Amino acid sequence: GLEANGIHVTPIWAGVCGDQAPHLYKRLGPDILEKKADVVCLNIGVNDVHHMMNRGFRNHEADVYESNLRAILKATKEANIRTVLVTPTMLGEMPRTPKNVLVDRCCDTMRALAREFRLPLGDANAAMKASLQRLFDARPKGCARRMFFEKDSVHMWREGFVVLAIATLKGLGLDEAQLAKAGAYWIEKGKVK
């Protein structure tokens, strides 16, 4: 999306599959701060919730998520790194499941921290919910439900990554014309249909 708009970056791929906020905080120094990143996009929370629920949720764990995210934001602010927060996507495509209620709590925490630290926010969670509602509303009556964005209630299909990418680009400040250009570029390159 950035490349399509003539914005050239050198990415530092620092995401680790399965990581949770405490893991990200531990890796922040060597993976981000020491590499002198200019911008960091933080999308964290899905694995925190997934593992909390699998262990049997304990209320203090939501506080651990917030305290680690807060520590990360303080460190990136002190290092003068422009930080963009991107809310976690859903865990499964039914919004009111216990997992998604907890994801919503993480999203609320992230939104509050974005306001507190005056950071841009890409709201991938709200975008996914809105997209799902449009898809559900457009379904013919009696049509079987299928997974639109996720293949197993955790890992996304390409369509889910598009929702996440657009939310991230919005958080980075791209406008509607730039987002349309990014979408056309992705189609041209065969990344989406």
Image (cartoon, grey):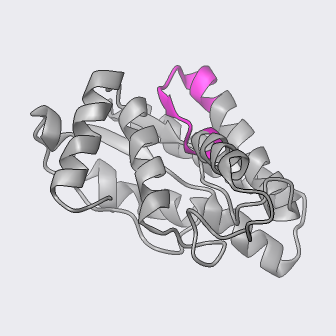
Where residue 147 sits in the image (x, y, percent)?
63, 69
Is residue 19 covered in magenta? no
Q: Residue at x 55, y 55 (%)?
A: 44
Q: Residue at x 23, y 42 (%)?
A: 184
Q: Residue at x 15, y 33 (%)?
A: 5
Q: Residue at x 55, y 44 (%)?
A: 124
Where residue 177 sits in the image (x, y, percent)?
28, 23
Say which of 95 and 33 sits in front.
95
Looking at the image, residue 72 lies above or below residue 82? below
The residues colored magenta run 113-126
Say how many tags the image has.
0
Residue 178 lies left or right of residue 117; in this view the side is left
Would residue 33 be seen by someone viewing this image from the given angle? yes
Where residue 159 sits in the image (x, y, percent)?
45, 59
Q: Quadrant of the C terminus?
A: bottom left
Looking at the image, residue 108 lies above or below residue 10? above
Q: In the image as oriented, which residue stretches furthest toward the front?
A: 141
Residue 36 lies left or right of residue 160; in this view the side is left
Q: Quadrant of the N terminus?
A: top left
Where residue 38 sits in the image (x, y, percent)?
24, 37
Looking at the image, residue 77 lies above or below residue 41? above
Is residue 121 covered in magenta? yes
Would residue 11 be seen by someone viewing this image from the given angle? no
